[in-house]
Image (cartoon, coloured by chain):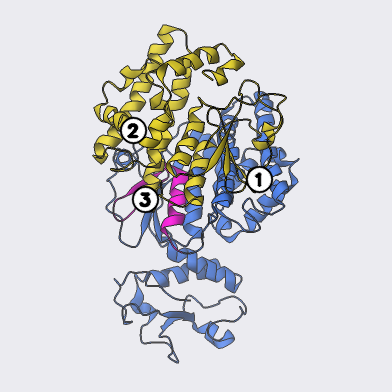
Chain colours: A blue, B yellow
Amino acid sequence: MYCKGACSGNIGCDLPPGAQAAVVGSSFLERVGNPPARWVGSPKGLCAQISFQRPGSAGPCAHSPGRADGCPSLALLRKIGEARPTSWLNFKLHWELGLCCAAMSGGTVRSLGKGSAPPGPVPEGLIRVYSMRFCPYAKRTLLVLRAKGIRHEVININLKNKPEWFFKKNPLGLVPVLETSLGQLIYESAITCEYLDEAYPGKKLLPGDPYEKACQKMVFESFSKVPSLMVSFLRKQNKEDCSGLKEELHKEFSKLEEVLTNKKTTFFGGSSLSMIDYLIWPWFEWLEALELNECVDHTPNLKLWMASMKNDPIVSSLPTDVKTLQDFFNLYLQNSPEACDYGL
Amino acid sequence: MSGGSARSLGKGSAPPGPVPEGLIRVYSMRFCPYAQRTRLVLTAKGIRHEVININLKNKPEWFFKKNPSGLVPVLETSQGQLICESAITCEYLDEAYPGKKLLPGDPYEKACQKMVLESFSKVPPLILKILRTQNKEDCSGLKEELHKEITKLEEVLTDKKTTFFGGNSLSMIDYLIWPWFERLEALELNECVDHAPTLKLWMAAMKKDPTVSSLLTDVKTFQGFFNLYLQNNPEAYDYGL
């Protein structure tokens, strides 16, 4: 487990540039050795007992936590410690995720609205995503950023009160938008996701085989009616008119069920999670909040897929609380400028 | 590459056999702009292929096994793999076959081409609406909208300062949007590019491209097809043969 220079070298701790600090808690060293082979108990006292250790050396280096205020790695460790992870894997996951999400280590997630100052250029080594906490399209991009461990910062936009400068990022004024440190702008959620998969190393979420890739795109196409159906359902005041919409939704879900049944795999791209699963997932999170769970009653494979998705570490790192979502829907439908920051 | 001018297959026709090895098959229709995308890419990349035209007003039952939505284009490989949706077929061909890449290798440049395709996306349904609208009043409103969409594309070209939408040579995005520009004259919509000089130059450059010109359909033939198509006449799809 390494600090990976989360501060980009700004902190000036006494490790030489490029050196990887082995971050361990002394409680780990005592109980399970280094690196920890298995997790023994909860990291009690982790927050107070972290130290940096040079690789190959016997004990902690002179750098003490006290001197490291402003060190993002330490701040992250403290934050994880507060959440009391229950397993070594869980701890590692939060560590990796935390390193990639710069916005997590402090800073406000309140959205920027009209009259706000435009943000500065994107720091090198990061990519920025303009987002909104409840936007399912933006969630696609966030899932991919996390799945690939891409270091990023999030700027939330008040979609009911958009800053004027935001239209320079995307003339359509929609999220998500990616901005690189070179000032390149990419928008349209599916395009952002494909861009990230191609531009960044690590696990490829899209298959390399042209036919398999085409298959994922065809599934994506057959999913395409679902978002507008769900938005229509959301907007209906009179729940009586909804049976037609529910029927249509049910039909679309049956198409997806067929895909899974024919493929005989858990996920839409095979036996492990891949791009297509992340692309369609955010709308399935809405089902419960919209009281549409019945629409997957006759689609058992889809139900199983939903359960598997909920268990995925990346998906569960971005949970959606049903009540919060419902309250957001209410505010959003009333065009309230408070909607996008609901729950903060 | 023969078969581009073959009579379409309709209801009651025998399903075609498997695709011979070394070939790829495209289910098409001679006047379909979406299928033209696929044929442009097949031709541009020199991919050996056969064309089976489908009568879209009288579809063969077996065709729904190729594409449950019953639409063209569909690609079928010699292994029986089926690929639908025009943009997906084009990307598949570019990746699966060697030779000149029509899509850029750079992820950002590729994303830019896809963003242009997205900003073009309102044009096909608009043009279809205009074709189907008899009422002159409704038509002028639609023509205004088309003019607006075309202005967006003009802006892309003027910002890029290149002849084509992907740079100084023709690439995927140009082929993907061309078929609708080819139909403007036959639909008497040339005025919609009047205030788009860079786009006009692009159209002229496209017509000179060997691939584009090899698949060009003349105005009279388009108009003959459009007339029969609007009358829901199944003969439309074989017009001119």
Q: Disc 2 or disc 3, which is closer to the eye?
A: 2
Question: Where residue A251 appears, x then y in whole percent?
Answer: 69, 34
* Spatial separation of the CA atoms under disc 2 and disc 3: 24 Å
Q: Position of residue B65 (x, y in %)?
A: 69, 36
Task: Please tell me whether residue A268 is drawn above or below residue A3 in the rendered image.
Answer: above
Q: Which amino acid, mark 3?
A: Tyr
Apparent side of residue A250 relative to residue B72 in the rendered image (left or right): right
Q: Chain of mark 3?
A: B
Q: Tag 1: residue type?
A: Gly
Q: Are marks 2 and 3 on the same chain?
A: yes
Q: How many C-alpha atoms fall within 10 Å of the one at disc 1: few (<14), some, or many (≥20)? A: few
Label 3 crowd bin: few (<14), some (14–19), many (20+), radius 10 Å: some
Q: How many marks?
A: 3
Q: Which chain contains the residue that carries disc 2?
A: B
Q: Residue at x 30, y 73 (%)?
A: A11
Element type at mark 3: helix
Along the line of sight, which residue is nearer the eye, A274 or A60? Answer: A274
Q: Which residue in the structure is indicated by mark 3? A: B108
Point out the tag, 1 or 3, that comes first from the N-terminus. 1
Chain letter, disc 1 residue: B
Residue that label 1 marks: B80
